[in-house]
Image: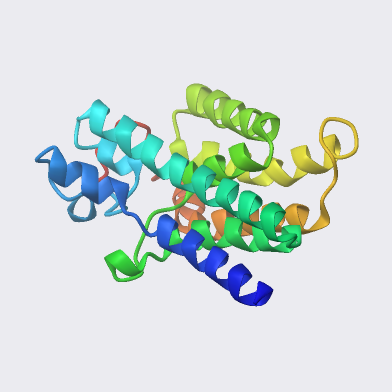
Amino acid sequence: MLWMIAVLTVGLAYVLGSLPFAVIISRLMGLQDPRTFGSNNPGATNVLRSGNKAAAALTLVGDLLKGTVAVLLAYKISAYFGLSTVVVACSAIAVFLGHVFPFTLGFKGGKGVATAIGILIAIQPGLALACALTWLAVAYVFKFSSLAAIAAAILAPVYYLLGAGSVWPMDVPIAFAIIILSVLLLWRHSANIRRLLLGQESRIGQNKP
């Protein structure tokens, strides 16, 4: 019985992650499908290339909230049924994979940065704040959304491990989940890393050739 609840919880997280807010909001606002221009990526950064900042902001909030809601639900369900935080860790990974490989879009989704931040908000708000500030600082200085995401992804597990035991309690399954999410984020940005090294990466707000 408990294993079934655990599986359903993780499955629900994946379904929540598969909600394509970039596409949904663009359709509701009468905008072009973000999969047809720029990076073809259904995410907030590419929606911003449409020139509609409100749509980009709503996409960002939607992608962030689905990460937060999925993990908070996993925490609540785990606490109620006495399940291990392994279920929470798996749910965190599942909602991220739902965004990256959504069944609603033929398993072709976004990079997952906003959803990852939403996950961290549910795990530890202080950790999410540190990563968000890292993203903002790098994005402000260098004007590259991808570089900001890469920096935040690399530092997320470092921040968690540095704060464990002092700023927040240490949880091994959660620590592993954060490391896995960081690796997945770096993998999703592999093409961006190549373009950055070649000097071909588009800056924030710039139309991608």
Estimate the x, y position of residue 75 in percent, counting from the top left: 65, 50
Image position of 86 with respect to 51: above or below? below
Q: Is residue 199 visible?
A: no
Estimate the x, y position of residue 153 in percent, counting from the top left: 62, 45
Q: Quadrant of residue 87?
A: bottom right
Q: Residue at x 37, y 40 (%)?
A: 62
Image position of 120 with respect to 190: above or below? above
Q: Quadrant of residue 89?
A: bottom right
194 and 5: which one is in front? 5
Q: Residue at x 23, y 50 (%)?
A: 23
Query: Would residue 1 appear left or right of 207 to someone viewing this image?
Result: right
Q: Quadrant of residue 177?
A: bottom right
Q: Residue at x 42, y 56 (%)?
A: 16
Estimate the x, y position of residue 133 in percent, counting from the top left: 60, 25
38 and 25: which one is in front? 25
Image position of 131 with respect to 156: above or below? above
